[in-house]
Amino acid sequence: MTSLNFFIIFFSPCSHRSSFFYSYRRLNMTQFKCIVLLVLWMATSTFASDDPCASSRYKNFKMCVPHGILNACEALANNKLKDGLTIKCVPARDRMECLEKLEHSEADFMAVDPEDMYVAFQIDNDDFSVFSEIRTIEEPDAEFRYEGIMLVHKNSSIKSLTDLRGKKSCHTGYGRNVGYKIPITKLRKHDIFKLSSNQYLPSLERELKGLSELFSESCLVGTYSPNEEINRLYKKRFSNLCALCEDPEKCNYPDKYSGYEGAIRCLVEKGGDVAFTKVIYVRKFFALPINNRASKTQPQANPSDYEYLCEDGTRRAVTDKPCSWAARPWQGYMGNLGVKQCSNHIQNLVKEFYEQGKTSSDKASATKLWINEKNVVVAKEKQVFPGDHLTRAQYKDVIEREGPFEQKIRLCTSNDVEMRKCSVMQKAAYSRDIRPQFECVLSSDCIQSVRNSESDATVVTIRNRRKARENQLIPIAHELSDDHYFVIVKKDLSNDLLANTPIKFDPNDEKSRDAALNFNYQRGHEKCSGFTIDESPVRVVRFNQSSTELNIDSEEFICRGIRRPIVLDQLDVSNCRYDATPPLTVYVRNTLASFEQDGIKHAFSALSDKFGKDGSLVDVFEMFGEFEPGKRDVLFSDNAKSLITVDSINLTESFFNYDGDEETMFTNIRCWD
């Protein structure tokens, strides 16, 4: 309905719709007044619609942050901004949940990596847009963070991509973008890089073998697998990938011939034929102008002796415009479509917030929010959908690089909340190059599902450990935790009273119950008695929960029946802990081929390495911890810190059999069933 029609209907006492347009010369005074009202009303409405951001709603933007950096966000958000604009920090479990909050308009924007943009694209590309980027002061006008290039000697015999076979290659490092992912993605696209045809090799090994067969010698430092045994095996098996490194035996950082500049140095000094690196370091190495500013350093080699190798096989001088194969977008800020119409407001707000953060005395908080004195926020002239942005950079192909990973890990979940966590984990893992990729399966009986080949892996608790073994499943990894449970007693409690005094414990904590049961059994109580949740001079304490729970002056430990003073720096954990619950364990069926098992071990190791409690990307996805409010120990234990594969600590099946008191444990568990 138009504003005019609305007005006619609304102001019907002034004039009937059938005669409203009769003739302005026949209008009476009442009709004239109504027209004046109409004009004023339409002008006001037009003005309001031209500035939808004038309302108070768009003076208070909500920025979503992982809960681990909420305090940092609030510390900087308290700074006063111009025009009365404010930022409210909205906490989330991690960045994956922040994307959900943006989608559901519970937050307006968040800071993102290109990989977060990819997940947003997978959720619903049309619900998100990238409106500003965090660029370096050195390259504020560069469209992308860096562009992957290939550098060769000018007098090289490499005249086409085919000529790369058998040459010596220099890489920034294993798993890195310009030095590994981009060249493998692009060279495979052109059928230069070929995967090993041996289908019975582990997924990761097929890729490394293909690279080893493509180049005669290389420098490719790094950790090939978080599983140390697999890492050592591959470096020994494909030793030519480390031959050009400063320390071929170690083949890891730091190395003179690794990193962006190191790859160029490998080409110049170590006899390499091709270097995979990024443009700005080429310009720095050869002392070429950057952003139209002359270099103040001396070139480390003669730039006229080197050229870019382009995707079509042509060459360009390093002094010319480079020909990149693919680029990695800048980190930036992404919002939902609800704030898209107010792009100028939010762009100015974020830029001011960032600049104030650079001058803040709270450097620790600024760093957590990606605020760096060497960077600047640059508003995009036109907001872009994340999928379009990644496609333009050719970075979407790099993330979706399948390589040798046709294998998928079908992880079985037993309820809806586990299925939801698995789904979120799968998206985070895939975007962060964890392969083989995960696929989530829902089943009422995961052990049977794995045995019947309907899924490949499941996480098993103590209650189902025996059933898993009876169905020929085998363990491949288990949780690790710093949580230890001890029994604490009052010093003035006699040994006679100790034998029968009720034990206080947390009935909602399985490990606390376990410790109480274990101590109760050791003091001669075999039945479901001797417990309390009320105050008692005998209690179970989780050590790292809070040291204030320990009263050094009035309490002491019970260590295998012996009373000992509470001296934390001399605590004998192995003899004093009473939690005997075996950790949650990942099981697979015993009919999986060894290469399939290795692929699953590698993937779970990578999950833990990136998303565990000490993981490098725990703010992207929290593998351990509360997944949803009130939902404890979903898929993995909330209090666990990492996963460790069986072979990496040389554990035997007997550890997982838990033959000691397992029968007693199963009997006692029924006390609370």
Image (tube, rainbow, N blue to C red):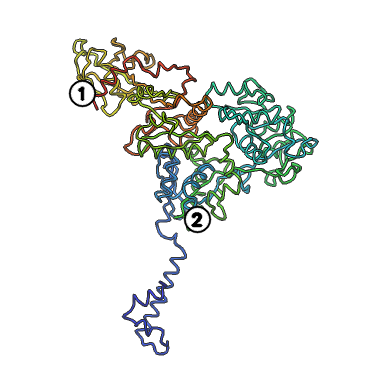
Query: Mark 2 packing: few (<14 Cα in 10 Å), some, or many (20+)?
Result: many
What is the x, y in percent for residue 594? 52, 24
What is the x, y in percent for residue 19? 37, 85
Q: Quadrant of residue 24?
A: bottom left
Amino acid on which disc 1 is placed: Thr
Residue bearing mark 2:
343
Q: How many marks?
A: 2
The answer to whether residue 358 is visible is no
Q: Quadrant of residue 541?
A: top left
Amino acid on which disc 2 is placed: Ser
Query: Mark 1 packing: few (<14 Cα in 10 Å), some, or many (20+)?
Result: some
Q: Residue at x 60, y 24 (%)?
A: 234
Q: Earlier in the sequence, mark 2 or mark 1?
A: 2
Query: Dots 2 and 1: beta carbons under 8 Å?
Result: no
What is the x, y in percent for residue 453? 44, 31
- Up the image or down, 651 lies above or below 640; here it is above
- Up the image or down, 396 lies above or below 342; here it is above
Quadrant occupied by the N terminus: bottom left
Task: Give the label on residue 532, or none.
Answer: 1
Q: Is residue 160 left or right of residue 147?
A: right
What is the x, y in percent for residue 639? 37, 28
Q: Residue at x 46, y 48 (%)?
A: 109
